[in-house]
Amino acid sequence: MTNTEQKVYGNLINGEWVVSQGSQPIEVRSPVDGSLVGRLSSMSQQELDQAAAAAKGARKAWAACPVYQKAQYMYRAADLLEQRAEEIAECLVMEIAKDRKSAVSEVKRSADLLRYTADVGKSLHGETISGDSFPGGSRGKMSFVTRVPVGTVLAISPFNYPVNLAISKIGPALMGGNTVILKPATQGAVSALKMVEAMQDAGLPAGVLNTVTGLGSVIGDSIVTHKDVDFINFTGSTEVGQHISALTAMTPVIMELGGKDAAIVLEDADLDFAADNIVDGAYSYSGQRCTAVKRILVLEQVADALVEKLKVRIERLKTGDPREAGVTVTPLVSTKSADFVENLMKDALAKGAVLVTGGTRQGNLLAPTLLDHVTTGMDVAWVEPFGPVLPIIRVSSQQEAVEIANRSEYGLQSSVFTNNLNKAYSIAAQLEVGTVQINNKPERGPDNFPFLGVKSSGMGTQGVRYSIEAMTRPKAVTINLTEE
């Protein structure tokens, strides 16, 4: 693979970097300044089949590879990622407009994730079950239960964390003994391929890790329904996730989809602390995160005070070019995304929402925006914007906050800000989400914690140990002895 943007980034197939022939390369343009970040191979069905065949062909040997050896590959890959963090971060900045500090952090966090995954993989053991532990059982029966790989895992990663959310799939899959095909989002694919190059340079055997690039509209259905794909680990929109589910009813999946994470602020909350967390949670990377704070449900008696504290903090945020130090809000990943967010904002204002701050746009850069007096009749109360627009919904009671939070089709995370632990626990028990953060913003990590969504936010559980277990299956060997 070359770093020269004028050449085409090929795909890793059976240990070799292959440039697709006979199809027009896909140009990846920077949302920062429109410059060419790179050109991607647009794979044909035949080349896709070759990648799948390579993964299938490597299964047996990789499954038989001792766990400690698999771990050594992960450790070496982590070291290489760390060594190349600056280079990959530079690509992230230009390819997805992520601020430089966050870009470097993403790569280094991914290296840590690989090391931890290797450690966890080495510590997972099977179990032995004696037959006489069950009524009517016999000491003559012993079952040895181990975990075996499911086969080939298709890892589909999103644009917003093209390194970390690829590694979080690849590492556990490989440590579980599976082979992997990575399908990165087109915007973010150059960064993802640089990460894959580091993993391959760590010495992975040919065929264990392969990549597929091309427009989802062209090859998406072909790869998710491919006969040699045994498991799908997908992060992306709810719409695409539902489409994949409809096509692959018999293929096991983990899906991390959309969210409409609510921050519930009670009357006894530390409002300065809550405002700090909410602003960080809502506007980091321009709100282009599934776990971003996407709505505030605040008790009426403290709403005015919270709005003022939020306004001050939001107006301190630095916006603009992600290459500049201290920038938080950067251009959205595409004009389509910026149009979508702007239309949500305009719809709310037309229906009576009050603009507290923000509301402007330059190209794909939207100013961090706060909307007050949002009602449940406005789209922005329910639709995930994936941008820097935050609605405030005032509520009269704790129970009304819970009811509105649960009325959403999404169920990823929620936050509760209060100094009353009894109230916090009571609300947490009622919220229909995968994770409740008490006195903290929603967030994905640490990567060893379980990460899951309910309703339209996903299915299955991620987190290193949980992901390894999901991408392996129990296998029991029962020995029948003659009792003396």
Image (cartoon, rainbow, N blue to C red):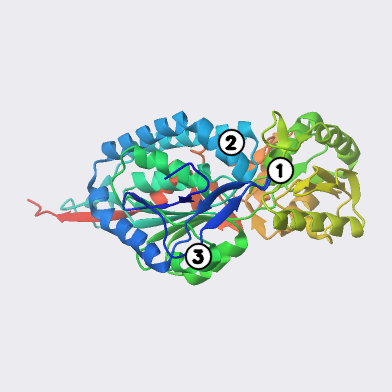
Residue 405 placement (x, y as % from top left): 73, 53
Labels 3 and 1: the sequence-earlier one: 3
Residue 127 placement (x, y as % from top left): 28, 45
Q: Judging from the image, what secondary structure is the residue with disc 1 in?
A: helix
**Residue located beneath label 3 in the image:** 220
Q: Is residue 320 above or below residue 143?
A: above
Residue nearer the viewer, 268 or 209? 209
**Residue located beneath label 2 in the image:** 103
Q: Residues within 10 Å of mark 2 (few under 14, many from 20)?
A: many
**Quarter of the image where one finds residue 344:** bottom right
**Residue located beneath label 1 in the image:** 286
Q: CA distance from mark 3 to mark 1?
A: 27 Å
* Three-letter residue code for mark 2: Ala
Q: In this orientation, does residue 478 appear?
A: yes
Answer with left or right where residue 289 lies relative to residue 19: right
Residue at 78% in and 46% down: 366
Location of the N terminus (image quadrant) = top left
Q: Is residue 414 above or below residue 72?
A: below
Q: Residues within 10 Å of mark 1 (few under 14, many from 20)?
A: many
Q: Judging from the image, what secondary structure is the residue with disc 2 in?
A: helix
